[in-house]
Image (cartoon, rainbow, N blue to C red):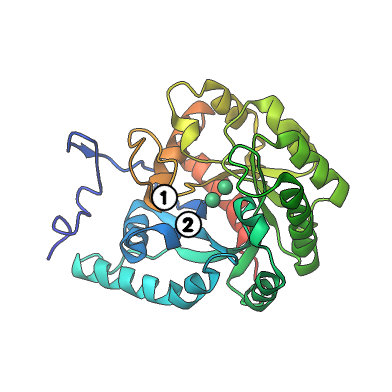
Amino acid sequence: MDAADLGFDPLFRDSKGRAVATPDFGGNPVADTHAHLDMLDDPALALARAAIAGVGFIATVADVTEDAWRTYAELDSWLAGASELLAQAGMAEVALPRVRIILGAHPHNAKDWTPEARAEFERLVADPRTCAVGEMGLDFHYDHSPRDVQRAVFAEHIALASTHGLPAVVHLREAHADGAAILAESGPPPAGFILHCFNLAPADAAPFVDLGAHVSFAGPVTFKKAEEVRDAARAADAGRLLTETDCPFMAPEPFRGTTCEPALVTFTAARIAEARAEQPTQFARASYAAAIALLDRDRS
Ligand SMILES: [Zn+2]
Ligand SMILES: [Zn+2]
């Protein structure tokens, strides 16, 4: 078995099977600040591919109303599996990403935030790999949970982030006014918060930036017609701009519509650097430093 057999060389192919070059950041790592590794078919393979692409840090979401415990139980074996794949490909020297965990209940699942789920949260949040609380927030597009329940569970999650000294990872869909009001009323967690998968215009980000938000961009910032999202990325303060995939959703161009994976954050980062007219090297350094400062704090 070699790198080509494993699909590592080339790492990326377009829909017509042609090799697509991995974006070059001059050897600087990039961060995927929001992944759902537990939703991928093969998390070990995805971690190996992320390592080869130059992803140095991943924050993966674990939902206590689903099977958050599985990420905590299996993460080490996913990483060991990734190491093994790299060794098989003759790439044993490639460093694996550091992986940490975002813990909470998705707004879709707010109705399942029971005393048992809260007890599970308290049990898992003590694990030093937990780096943030979330994803929390409001999703009024799907309305999988009643809106009042979503609002109450969001406020409770903000309080939990504050209590545990962790940043909050906020998901908002068609609910930005309500979301900003709840954050303002609760007071954002002292450790900060991320407005994740931001895909609107600069004016939509402004109330959150005023509250101290980090703004995180995923695949949509690369979409051809998403000029206003790129305007938001241009407007963002370099120290508060993050990159993510939200994989398996939201694959960036030129892979839109396919299953997303952490390795693809490199394409999102490259597109933002281009939109901001920054050198990829400079952009990678700044966005990686912002991600690490927020999400890779020592808790032990
Ligand atoms: Zn989300
Ligand atoms: Zn997500």
> Which residue, as the protein is rendered here, is positioned at the far right?
185
Marks 2 and 1 close (CB-CB < 8 Å): yes
Residue 67 appears left or right of 110: left
Instruction: Pinpoint residue 48: horizontal percent, then vertical percent.
Output: 32, 62
Badge 1 amino acid: Pro
- Label 2 Cα neighbours within 10 Å, binned few <14 / some 14-19 / many ≥20: many
Answer yes or no: is residue 288 visible.
yes
Q: Is mark 2 within 8 Å of ligand 2?
A: yes
Badge 2 amino acid: His
How far is disc 2 from disc 1 in space, using C-alphas?
7 Å
Q: Residue at x 52, y 69 (%)?
A: 67
Q: Is residue 215 above or below residue 43?
A: above
- Between 171 and 60, the one lying in front of the other is 171
The residue pinned by badge 2 equals 36
- Under circle 1, the secondary element is loop
- Under circle 2, the secondary element is loop
Instruction: Pinpoint residue 297: horizontal percent, then vertical percent.
Output: 65, 66
Q: Which mark is residue 294?
A: none
- Between 106 and 95, the one lying in front of the other is 106
* Mark 2 or 1, nearer chain start: 2
Instruction: Pinpoint residue 74: horizontal percent, then vertical percent.
Output: 43, 75
* Number of numbered discs: 2
- Between 15 and 157, the one lying in front of the other is 157
Q: Residue at x 74, y 31 (%)?
A: 206
- The image quadrant that residue 296 belongs to is bottom right
Q: Which mark is residue 248?
A: 1
Q: Is mark 1 within 8 Å of ligand 2?
A: no
